[in-house]
């Protein structure tokens, strides 16, 4: 398989798509997306069979998909923004990756047949989705029975009664809709017919400026975020904000789950081919 181009199977009209068009180069050079600890934890808890066929949903510039390509024979990276995929194509070609192909499409309506993939991942993207339950349903649909779903996303703190965290994120990025809590994601995934195999919260300390990237601190968005943070003691508390080094803590859920038998909702003694 060769990633010689990007297949356009839909005409996506995702809200806020201009944000990703404008910042595709910045995402392509994001060390956090490329080397974040959450990616290492996710990879450690995925199946190791080389014969697996994998899909990375909302792949962006393809960092997760490229790691999957080290594990599996066939990998597809799906995203709604062609500019992001173009950057991923450049990066994967630079690494001489031949078993990865990028496809334009939506997370809530994937252009694939039922029972197609052994592994489906989605990393750092679900907070942008309009229909999170629809997305999980699509993951369930395209996974083979007893296939593996690997999920990573930022978490909204359990004690954020005013939704300050999500408002803070929206000020930086207008495409941010809502980050769920750990309980929300676990319950939603189980309700959709999965069994959670691994669930861990990672914590990343970062400066305010690094959190703000790719938005510039002196931009109108950057100034609004700074003002909101400095005026909100509750937000400072839930982010463990440290004024001395201008740092905060971002939490992410790393989760893997098995797609259960569609009839009995429990695994058979032997996995079906």
Image (cartoon, helix red, strand yellow):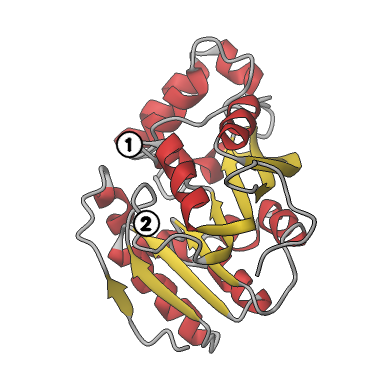
* Residue wearing tag 1: 174
Q: Position of residue 256 (x, y in %)?
A: 69, 49
* Residue occupying the point 68% across, 51% down: 38
Mark 1 neighbour class, 10 Å CA radius: few under 14, some 14 to 19, many 20 or more: some
Q: Position of residue 102 (x, y in %)?
A: 40, 72
Viewer-closest of 130 and 53: 53
Q: Quadrant of residue 192?
A: top right
Evaluate whether residue 217 shows in this view: no
Front: mark 1 or 2: 2
Q: Quadrant of residue 208?
A: top right
Viewer-closest of 212 and 121: 121
The dot on residue 110 is 2
Q: Earlier in the sequence, mark 1 or mark 2?
A: 2
Helix, strand or loop at mark 2: loop
Vertical placement of 161 versus 99: above or below? above
- Work out how far the residue at label 1 is from the one at label 2, CA to CA, in angstroms: 24 Å
Q: Position of residue 26 (x, y in %)?
A: 42, 60
* Residue occupying the point 30% across, 66% down: 83
């Amino acid at each position: 398989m060769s990633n010689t181009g990007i297949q356009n199977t839909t005409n996506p009209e995702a809200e806020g798509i201009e944000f990703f068009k404008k910042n595709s180069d910045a995402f392509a050079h994001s060390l956090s997306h490329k080397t974040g600890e959450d990616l290492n934890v996710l990879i450690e808890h995925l199946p190791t069979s080389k014969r697996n066929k994998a899909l990375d949903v909302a792949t962006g510039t393809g960092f997760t998909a490229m790691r999957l390509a080290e594990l599996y024979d066939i990998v597809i990276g799906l995203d709604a923004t062609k500019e992001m995929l173009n950057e991923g194509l450049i990066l994967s070609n630079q690494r001489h990756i031949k078993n990865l192909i990028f496809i334009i499409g939506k997370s809530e309506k994937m252009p694939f047949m039922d029972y197609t993939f052994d592994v489906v991942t989605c990393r750092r993207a679900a907070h942008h989705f309009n229909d999170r339950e629809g997305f999980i349903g699509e993951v369930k649909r395209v996974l083979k029975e007893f296939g593996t779903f690997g999920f990573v996303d930022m978490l909204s703190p359990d004690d954020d009664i005013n939704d300050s965290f999500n408002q803070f994120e929206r000020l930086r990025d207008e495409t941010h809709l809502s980050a769920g809590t750990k309980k929300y994601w676990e319950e939603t995934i189980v309700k959709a017919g999965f069994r959670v195999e691994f669930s861990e919260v990672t914590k990343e300390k970062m400066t305010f400026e690094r959190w703000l990237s790719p938005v510039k601190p002196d931009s109108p968005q950057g100034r609004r975020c700074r003002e909101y943070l400095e005026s909100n003691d509750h937000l400072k508390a839930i982010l463990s904000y440290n004024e001395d080094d201008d740092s905060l803590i971002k939490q992410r859920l790393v989760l893997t789950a098995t797609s259960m038998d569609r009839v009995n909702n429990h695994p058979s003694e032997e996995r079906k081919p």
